[in-house]
């Protein structure tokens, strides 16, 4: 059973995770901050990690860009949940593909491991991430030539809808792609819950 929670800003909707997964205490989560390492997002990343701990989860951090394939495989397989932070989606995808973590992630999620993707972590599971270039700087991923995403969903998440900082970028994405791609816009207080073929947008 495929189970995913895709969000704009986890700190705002962490209660949704607790609602859909009530038995979080002492479970382990592979926490992947890779997308945030090329952006100034330290504060938000720390809050996200703190929220996970407050929910009772044991956080096992995995920095994809500096880890070996064996370490990535071990952590993704052994922990109960996978969490991917926001940041630069192109850099995230570049490092997932470079290390082989992309295939490992797909395998674990298809086996039923619960995936939580925040912003970049929500975009990267789409069939292709090129649509998000209005929001993220492609030049931060100079080695990435193929923008095909993890293809775990058949739609395209547009996070930070009506957000004061990203509002204009989101508007450009919606105007450019709404007629050609199946976009799902979510604001910072919403989450998309995917359970096999069921897709629901939840409010906090």
Image (spheres, rainbow, N blue to C red):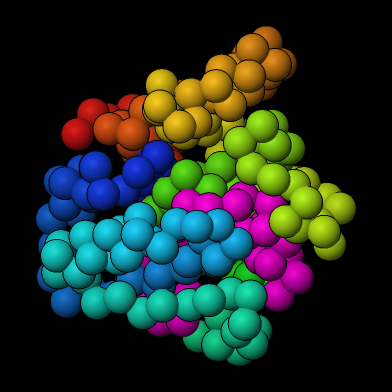
Can residue 194 be seen here? no
Q: Is 29 in front, or is 165?
A: 165
* Residue 171 in the image: above or below residue 134: above
Residue positioned 58% across, 74% down in the render: 64
* Residue 178 horizontal/vertical position (percent): 63, 14
* Residue 181 in the image: above or below residue 108: above
Q: Which residues are magenta?
A: 75-99
* Residue 128 horizontal/vertical position (percent): 71, 40
* Residue 119 in the image: above or below residue 100: above
* Residue 109 horizontal/vertical position (percent): 49, 59
Residue positioned 41% across, 78% down in the render: 61
Is residue 1 toward the left or the right of residue 142 in the image?
Answer: left
Q: Quadrant of residue 83?
A: bottom left
Residue positioned 40% across, 27% down in the render: 163
Residue 44 on the magenta segment: no
Q: Quadrant of residue 72?
A: bottom right
Is residue 18 toward the left or the right of residue 63 in the image?
Answer: left
């Amino acid at each position: 059973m495929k189970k995913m929670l895709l969000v704009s800003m986890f700190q705002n909707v962490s209660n949704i995770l607790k609602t859909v997964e009530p038995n979080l205490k002492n479970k382990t989560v592979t926490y992947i901050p890779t997308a945030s390492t090329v952006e100034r997002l330290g504060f938000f990343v720390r809050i996200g990690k703190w929220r996970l701990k407050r929910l009772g989860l044991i956080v096992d951090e995995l920095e994809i860009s500096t880890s070996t394939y064996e370490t990535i495989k071990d952590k993704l397989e052994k922990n109960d949940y996978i969490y991917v932070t926001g940041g630069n989606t192109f850099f995230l995808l570049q490092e997932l593909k470079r290390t082989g973590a992309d295939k490992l992630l797909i395998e674990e999620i298809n086996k039923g491991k619960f995936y939580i993707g925040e912003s970049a972590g929500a975009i990267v599971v789409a069939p292709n991430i090129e649509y998000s270039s209005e929001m993220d700087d492609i030049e931060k991923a100079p080695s990435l030539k193929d923008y095909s995403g993890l293809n775990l969903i058949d739609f395209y998440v547009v996070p930070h809808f009506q957000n004061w900082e990203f509002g204009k970028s989101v508007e450009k994405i919606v105007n450019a792609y709404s007629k050609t791609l199946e976009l799902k816009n979510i604001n910072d207080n919403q989450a998309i819950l995917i359970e096999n073929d069921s897709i629901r947008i939840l409010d906090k």
